Amino acid sequence: MPGRGGVVPGAAVIAGGRGEGGAISPSVTRWVVLLCVLVFTLEGTDIQLLAFAAPVLLKEWGLRQVDLAPALAAASVGMIAGSAVGGILGDLFGRRRVMLVSVASFGLCAMLSGMAVNLQHLELLRLVGGLGFGAVFPCVFSLVSELTPPGLQGRYVTITTLGVPLGSMVGALGVGWALPLFGWRICFYAAGALTLAVSILLVMKLPESPAYLQTRALRPKPAEASRTVASLPARDIPQQRMRTSLRGVFQLGYGRRTFGLWIASFALGYVNYAFSHWGPTMLTMSGLSLRASIMSNFFVGLFMAIAPFAMAWGLARFGSRTSMLSGIALYALAAILFGIVLPRFPGESEPVRTAAVMAALSLVGFAVGATTSGLYALSAYAYPPDCRSTGSGLSTAVGRLGSAATAFGSAIVLGRAGGGPTGIVVIAVGGLAIAAASTLVIDRHIAPNRSERGV
């Protein structure tokens, strides 16, 4: 039962009974976490490819920043649908199946993107690839949560998310080296081929969730279910069936946590992608070199990869409410510092300015990694196994709405509105304030683990 203030003890099994994670061997858990980190690493690279190539494409194709916004937003739009539909399909057909199809699809689209001859081709491929990007997230969170020992779900889900910033970091290194030498197309070819190779590894090695298999075994056969539902009024439909539907996310006492997760996801999605989508462009607009602008993603990715470990520790020691609010406060401070050091000051040497900008962006990256991984762990924790992928997927989809909004909104602020990078920072701080308020709305938080606190 929930504790005081709607907080559930960290050592409790998440509405899944003794079979959820408790009988899974540690070696299986570690192997699944490793595979999921690898998937997220590739996804982190593939998602950022267009952002890395954006400064070159703007010149090569004679575009303005706002012209590239639809292509940048296309992946996010696809991820909106992919996260929502992928979560539902994960509850219906299994986390493993959806992951296999999704990884193969975004790998193929990455390769084909290297052949694009105009923006329309690129937009279409990024849209389709985005469907695969989005569908992976809720299935990974559900699978890891359900193959993790009780009380450690939040920690392992949080650690799994380090793959996304790791992919951004690796991509920044690879693209920073290859882009000036071979052009942007080879970057898409290489990322796509590697992703397809990993999808084959998943076919051979990735297991299905026992919690999903147990839930499926408890469902009535289609003919039996049809007769049962037809003979009962809506209010008498068995709770098990209700929880496997979209209505279960809203009508079984989950409305407040769903609302809070959605608002927080949208706000953080907007702010995160304002920096990741338009980060290199903001730096080049401020006078930094193309190579330095691309390499900034390495530092952002490095600290994003470190942050999930810090958040995992924070979740165990302080719980998700305190940890999330602390991460958001740090994020606001980092954004303000970035806005202060980005302009060129009279008499300031270029190396000093570059170092200051990279330091501020590193702090931004740490805050992004901490808040994002904490939110993902919380979304997987908030729902029981029979609607976990659906609930987590819808939360992730709303976050993608925020990222799609920033692709256009930030382009307008940078270009037509004349706000420049400073305008992005002002909007980011406002979005973080909304995320903090939404965190307080959520009524089911991960509580501190007593053993971690020495109690």
Image (spheres, rainbow, N blue to C red):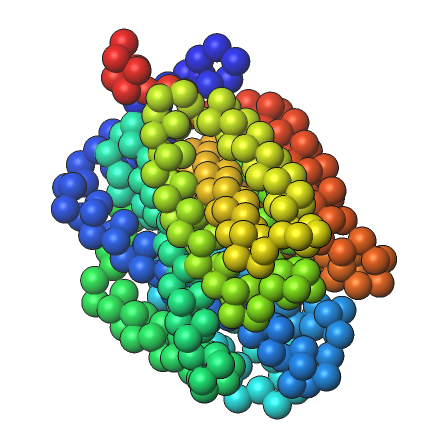
At x 45% / y 73%, what residue is drawn?
175
Residue in the foreground of this view, choosing between 277 and 6: 277
At x 30% / y 70%, what residue is drawn?
198
Q: Position of residue 448 (x, y in %)?
A: 37, 19
Query: Splitting the image into 4 quarters, where does residue 336 fall?
Result: top right
Inspect this view and state whether residue 415 appears.
yes
Query: Splitting the image into 4 quarters, where does residue 97 fall?
Result: bottom left
Residue in the foreground of this view, choosing between 163 and 238: 163
Q: Position of residue 361 (x, y in %)?
A: 53, 49
Q: Position of residue 229 (x, y in %)?
A: 53, 43
- Residue 117 is left or right of residue 310, and the answer is right
Q: Position of residue 452 (x, y in %)?
A: 28, 20
Vertical relation: 11 (above or below) 265:
above
Tally of marks: 0
Residue in the foreground of this view, choosing between 90 and 376: 376
Inspect this view and state whether residue 392 appears.
no
Q: Quadrant of the N terminus?
A: top left
- Residue 42 is left or right of residue 129, and the answer is left
Vertical relation: 103 (above or below) 15:
below
Q: Quadrant of the C terminus?
A: top left
Residue at the extreme right: 417
Vertical relation: 449 (above or below) 113:
above
- Residue 309 is left or right of residue 281, and the answer is left
At x 79% / y 63%, what residue is drawn?
415
